């Protein structure tokens, strides 16, 4: 008999803000998104590398609460589920960094960092471009409209499963992965180990 998943603990911005210095905040967005602006003191552990950080996050959770954040809340909910499955308790920030900034709270940006679009915006651009390309190409190459149908099906599956294969692929592009990602992750894991 399997046990039902534990509901994800959710923190509001009003709950997080006064406790910010006492919590370990982990931002699971791509390094490019993180560099474009993150909650002060947040550590960057991209969602696709979260499995590498489980021991460090377990150690951090032993010292106090862990809060996971992303742009809007979808990736942080996924991260909390993965961490719970690995025995690490974590809460997520409702609304993510977008809501944090909308409430007037500052975002840290490394000096000289160039802005990268949020992943959901990158996905909308890529999906919309592929749909248009499929429809336009169909005029010259009959059957190309199936590309548009495949993208639409992928988006519907993404909504139902609360996953995003296109976002995962886009997260691996060079503009979302600065050259120092491996070194940055090693430094982040060392900081989380305490």
Image: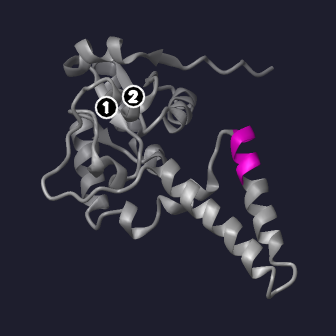
Percent position (x, y) of residue 149? Answer: 81, 62
Percent position (x, y) of residue 167? Answer: 55, 54
Q: Nearer the viewer, residue 110 or 61?
A: 110
23 in relation to 186, above or below: above
| Quadrant in the picture for residue 2 | top right
Residue beneath disc 2: 99
Question: Magenta includes 28?
Answer: no
119 in relation to 41, above or below: below
The quarter in which the N terminus is drawn is: top right
* Residue under the point 72% across and 18% down: 3
Q: Secondary structure at mark 2?
A: helix
Q: Magenta part of the protein: which range?
A: 155-161
Percent position (x, y) of residue 193? Answer: 26, 35
Check contact, mark 2 vs mark 1: CB within 8 A: yes
Q: CA distance from mark 2 to mark 1?
A: 5 Å
Residue beneath disc 1: 101
């Amino acid at each position: 008999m399997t046990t039902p998943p534990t509901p994800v603990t959710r923190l509001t911005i009003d709950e997080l803000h006064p406790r910010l210095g006492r919590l370990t905040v982990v931002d699971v967005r791509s390094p490019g998104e993180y560099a474009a602006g993150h909650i002060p003191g947040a550590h960057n552990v991209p969602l696709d590398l979260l499995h590498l950080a489980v021991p460090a996050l377990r150690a951090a959770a032993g010292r106090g609460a862990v809060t996971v954040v992303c742009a809007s809340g979808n990736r942080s909910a996924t991260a909390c589920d993965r961490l719970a499955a690995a025995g690490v308790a974590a809460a997520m920030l409702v609304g993510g960094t977008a809501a944090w900034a909308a409430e007037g709270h500052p975002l840290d940006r490394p000096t000289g960092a160039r802005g990268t679009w949020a992943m959901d915006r990158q996905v909308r651009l890529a999906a919309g471009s592929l749909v248009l390309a499929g429809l336009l190409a169909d005029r010259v190459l009959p059957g190309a409209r199936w590309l548009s149908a495949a993208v639409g099906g992928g988006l519907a599956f993404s909504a139902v499963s609360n996953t995003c294969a296109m976002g995962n692929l886009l997260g691996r592009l060079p503009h979302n992965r600065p050259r120092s990602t491996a070194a940055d992750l090693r430094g982040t894991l060392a900081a989380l180990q305490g």
